[in-house]
Image: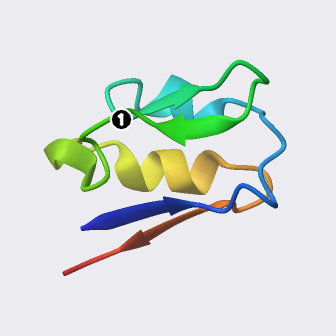
Amino acid sequence: MRIRINTDVCIGAGQCALAAPEVFTQDDDGFSELLPGREDGAGDPMIGEAARACPVRAITVEQG
């Protein structure tokens, strides 16, 4: 699995960090980013929910 955040689209709503705090965080400006070493989702079952919760669909999850 590979997770990507489109930083050009992200508005910093933080829903991803609320849904999957072991994978997502927010930078100093409030925009979403992946925690270091979590680019593959680290097996977190909430990755899909985090992507769905994003109000601007800035998160994509690629399987395989």
- Residue sitting at x 50%, y 45%: 50
Q: SS at mark 1?
A: loop
Q: Position of residue 40 (x, y in %)?
A: 24, 56
> For mark 1, what is the residue?
23
Q: Toward which corner of the image does residue 26 lie, by quadrant?
A: top right
Please indicate whether residue 36 sits to the left or right of residue 10 in the image.
left
The way the protein has been coloured in the rendering is rainbow
Work out which residue is located at the far top of the displayed protein and give it. 28
Work out which residue is located at the far bottom of the displayed protein and give it. 64
Locate the N terminus by quadrant: bottom left
Q: Position of residue 42 (x, y in %)?
A: 18, 44
- Residue sitting at x 81%, y 59%: 9
Q: Position of residue 8 (x, y in %)?
A: 80, 60
With respect to residue 24, does 43 lie above or below? below
Please indicate whether residue 56 sits to the left or right of residue 17 in the image.
right
Please indicate whether residue 33 sits to the left or right of residue 23 in the image.
right
Q: Toward which corner of the image does residue 48 lie, by quadrant?
A: bottom left
With respect to residue 61, does 13 lie above or below? above
Please give the count of numbered marks on the rendered protein.
Answer: 1
Please indicate whether residue 37 sits to the left or right of residue 59 in the image.
left
Between 45 and 40, which is closer to the camera in this rendering? Answer: 40
Label 1: how many Cα within 10 Å (few below 14, some 14–19, many 20+): many
With respect to residue 39, does 29 lie above or below? above
- Residue sitting at x 79%, y 24%: 29
Question: For the residue marked with disc 1, what is the amino acid?
Answer: Val
Locate the C terminus by quadrant: bottom left
